[in-house]
Image (tube, grey):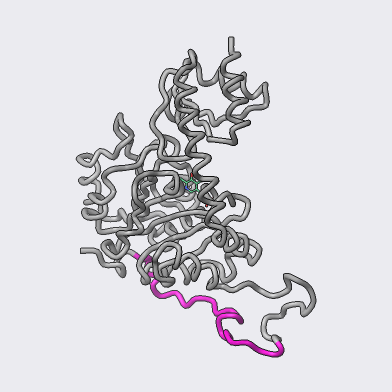
């Protein structure tokens, strides 16, 4: 049985969070003399610690109550908070499936948490038979699943099996979900009290510079995120541009559809090249491509000012190619065609 009070670290359960000036007085006043702010300027006031306006807009957009939403300084903040809330340093452990996003491992190291890395199978899917026995480990608190997965690009099938069989927290990182034909796990939030869904403004929303990431979970889990986060973790500049993006849904749809069309074009064009051995199917805005000589091709392209992600050390002979603008993609295809 899932029991959140057994998963949260005892010091976090007992934590009395910092109460900011803006937490203690929330109305409208004639003189704000409570937060040691400068009375002059455009950005002189502290931002809303709860990002209420952004949560209102997200709540409508995603059909999720506001109390189920956490806004972070990028998803990377949410990943770090998961370790800090649920994993006792030096004692508890987490599990993920490799190859995958590198921050699960770096964040585990920073927090002195052991991350067990189970390889995905040859189709880049979770090997359920090898996974379930690991759930008997006493101190396993967290499972990270990236779907669509970075760098392989595919969606993961066994997520609900994992959710049903694990009594700890399952974090599903949906950074690329907007590019996927599969449904988001957000629809299942009420069904699974142990589910945390991560999304971000950094990819399909085109706001990587703004640093706005989201975690969706039960109100109880979100309350721990709010307790542990720094009081003003998201700046007003950042949540304002996120709000502006949400208010222009047609721009978002247009850009996304353009990228999806470019992805199709790139799959076909890349498959025709002599240096390309395999283009893996992708539900994301990048392609994992097996080539004849990943290091050599990577270096030749760097000489021409075209930078790919060399994943040779992660998936042998593979490059990860982000879908760029039509012009950027054509530059890449031309350069690949001209390779000796
Ligand atoms: C790009 C990416 C993110 C985004 O992180 P932010 O901190 O929100 O920019 C999260 N997860 C994965 C798997 C990614 O590839």
Percent position of residue 196, x then y: 37, 59
Q: Residue at x 77, y 80 (%)?
A: 39
Q: Position of residue 327 (x, y in %)?
A: 63, 31
157 lies left or right of 200: left
Left or right, 173 with respect to 308, comes to left
> Where 106 sits versus 32, above or below?
above
Tell me which residue sits at (48%, 50%) in the image: 107
User: Where on the picture, by quarter, is residue 19?
Assistant: bottom right
Give the mark count. 0
Residue 53 visible in this rendered orientation of the protein = yes
Quick check: 139 above or below 28?
above
Give 242 or 1, whichever is nearer the viewer. Answer: 242
Q: Where does the C terminus fall, quadrant-wise?
A: top right
Evaluate whether residue 11 shows in this view.
Answer: no
Query: Which quarter of the rendered picture does the N terminus lie within?
Result: bottom left
In the rendering, at what x and y percent does residue 178 appear?
Answer: 44, 48
Task: In this rendered view, identify the residue nearer to me: 204 or 152.
Answer: 204
Seen at 63% across and 51% down, the residue is: 209
Q: Main secondary structure of the magenta part?
A: loop
**Magenta-colored span:** 8-31
- Residue 198 location in percent, x, y? 43, 55
Q: Is residue 85 rendered magenta in the image?
A: no
Direction from residue 62 to residue 249 in the image, left or right: right
Q: Which residue sits furthest bottom? A: 30
What residue occupies the far top of the structure in this picture?
340
Find out whether residue 23 is within the magenta segment: yes
Q: Can you say whether 142 is above or below 129 in the image?
A: below
Quarter of the rendering containing residue 197: bottom left
């Amino acid at each position: 049985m899932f029991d959140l009070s057994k998963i949260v670290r005892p010091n976090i359960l007992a934590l009395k969070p910092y109460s900011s000036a803006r937490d203690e007085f929330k109305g409208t006043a004639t003189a704000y003399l409570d937060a040691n702010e400068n009375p002059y300027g455009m950005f002189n006031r502290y931002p809303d610690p709860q990002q209420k306006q952004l949560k209102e807009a997200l709540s409508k957009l995603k059909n999720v109550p506001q109390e189920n939403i956490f806004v972070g300084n990028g998803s990377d903040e949410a990943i770090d908070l998961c370790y800090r809330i649920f994993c006792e340093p030096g004692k508890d452990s987490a599990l993920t499936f490799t190859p995958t996003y590198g921050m699960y491992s770096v964040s585990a190291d920073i927090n002195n948490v052991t991350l067990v890395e189970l390889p995905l199978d040859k189709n880049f899917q979770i090997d359920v038979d090898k996974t379930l026995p690991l759930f008997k480990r006493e101190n396993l608190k967290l499972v990270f699943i990236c779907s669509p997965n970075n760098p392989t690009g595919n969606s993961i099938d066994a997520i609900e099996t994992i959710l049903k069989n694990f009594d700890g927290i399952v974090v599903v990182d949906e950074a690329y979900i907007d590019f996927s034909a599969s449904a988001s796990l957000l629809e299942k939030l009420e069904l699974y009290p142990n589910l945390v869904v991560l999304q971000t403004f950094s990819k399909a929303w085109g706001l990587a510079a703004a640093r706005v990431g989201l975690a969706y979970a039960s109100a109880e889990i979100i309350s721990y995120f709010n307790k542990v986060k720094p009081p003003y973790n998201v700046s007003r500049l950042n949540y304002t541009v996120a709000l502006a993006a949400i208010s222009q849904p047609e721009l978002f749809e247009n850009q996304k559809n353009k990228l999806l069309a470019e992805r199709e074009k790139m799959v076909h064009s890349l498959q025709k090249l002599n240096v390309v051995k395999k283009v893996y199917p992708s539900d994301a805005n990048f392609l994992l491509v097996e080539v004849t000589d990943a290091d050599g091709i990577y270096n030749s392209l760097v000489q021409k000012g075209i930078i790919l992600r060399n994943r040779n050390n992660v998936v042998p002979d593979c490059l990860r190619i982000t879908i760029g603008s039509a012009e950027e993609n054509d530059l890449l295809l031309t350069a690949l065609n001209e390779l000796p």
